[in-house]
Image (spheres, helix red, strand yellow):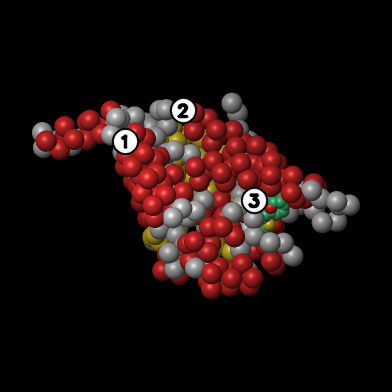
Amino acid sequence: MNFHTIILARRDNLLCLTLNRPDKLNSVDAVMREEISLALADASADDTVRAVLLTGAGRGFCAGQDLSERDIRADKASPNLEKSLRDGYNPIIQTLATMPKPIVCAVNGVAAGAGANIALACDFVIAAHSARFIQAFCKIGLVPDCGGTWFLPRLVGLARARSLAMLGDAVDATTAAAWGMIYQCVADDELTAHSEALAARLAQAPTAALGKIKNLLLASGDHSLPAQLALEAKTQDEAGRSADYAEGTQAFLQRRAPAFVGK
Ligand code: LHQ
């Protein structure tokens, strides 16, 4: 399929998805929403994709919803933001957070509004030193969406989540890393190589186990310790029947590097 607002590139088992409306800081219009959804659905279903790298073209990562789009503008009689979120953005966030394979997000520049929270839904967020995160919603009279009110308190605690969401000030990448909001901040000229190396490494990892780890961590937020222990035991039983577990133990005993197949 031909995409107009994103670029897809395959490198072995790694899929690289680049948001590509650089003139508008990769703000998300209806076409981009649809194309991201389709690309992620394909990546989810394709066993040969074992990791995803998400980034943005140009000087920004993503400036959130395209505010010039007719259907969401406040000057329209009744913009239906609930529908836009329910049908457009929420499935994207849900897929990023639950797709049973690792997703690295290389934040190459400003990440604002929905753009910030799309990044936070990914498993490893690595930001360039000059990147900024802005919960821009309150500046235009909206509330954080795309999971912002769910991710932020879990990542940075309530006090910082309140300041981010209710002041809408920019947080630089160094602070975001220090707060635990993102995984790492790296020098601007190292972002591409660093995030590609991590994503390539993850694409060789035991994918099924990483997917299970991802979902265990997600489930832990709603579970008691006994419930989580039970889920770990059940999930470990499944992992223990995998080809990659057999390979991992044999490789260990034979003192060689494992060759995981992702299953
Ligand atoms: C943009 C945008 C943009 C269009 C920059 N749209 N053109 C909302 C409603 C509905 C349903 C779902 O959910 C949401 C969620 C949301 O995401 S709400 C939050 C939307 N985003 C924002 O409020 C951020 C708006 N942008 C900004 O505040 C600034 O552009 C930032 C701080 C991101 C970057 O500032 P600068 O580096 O100074 O760049 P700039 O403002 O000059 O922008 C460059 C161009 O990109 C410019 O176009 P132009 O043709 O004049 O060169 C902007 O108009 C355009 N652009 N964000 N969201």
Tell me what residue is drawn at x 36 percent, y 39 percent. Answer: 234
Secondary structure category for the residue under label 2: loop
Q: Is residue 98 left or right of residue 113?
A: left
Which of the pair 216/75 is nearer the observer?
A: 216
Q: Which residue is at a point 39% across and 59% down the rendered structure image?
A: 184
Mark positioned earlier in the residue sequence (1 or 3): 3
Identify which amino acid the numbered label 1 is placed on. Asp
Q: Is mark 3 within 8 Å of ligand 1?
A: yes
Q: Which element type, helix, strand or loop, lies under badge 3?
A: loop
Point out the image quarter for the C terminus.
Answer: top left
Badge 2 is on which residue? 46
Q: Is residue 149 above or below residue 44?
A: below
For label 1, count other residues whose C-alpha is less than 10 Å away and answer few (under 14), some (14-19) or many (20+).
Answer: few
Residue ID for mark 3:
27
Image height check: is 84 above or below 183? above
Mark 2 sits near ligand 1, with its Cβ under 8 Å away = no
- Cα gap from disc 2 to disc 1, whole angstroms: 24 Å
Q: Furthest residue to the left? A: 254
Cβ atoms at labels 2 and 3 below 8 Å apart = no
Mark 2 vs mark 3, foreground winner is 2
Disc with the residue nearer the chain's start (2 vs 1):
2
x then y, percent, for residue 111: 56, 58
Return the mark for residue 237. Answer: 1
Q: Position of residue 241 (x, y in %)?
A: 29, 30
User: Does the rendering let one see residue 157?
Assistant: yes
Q: Is residue 127 above or below residue 89?
A: below
Q: What distance separates the C-alpha of mark 1 from that of mark 3?
A: 43 Å
The nearer-to-camera label among 2 and 1 is 1
Callout 2 amino acid: Asp
Q: Is residue 243 left or right of residue 43?
A: left
Look at the picture and state if 180 lies above or below 63.
below
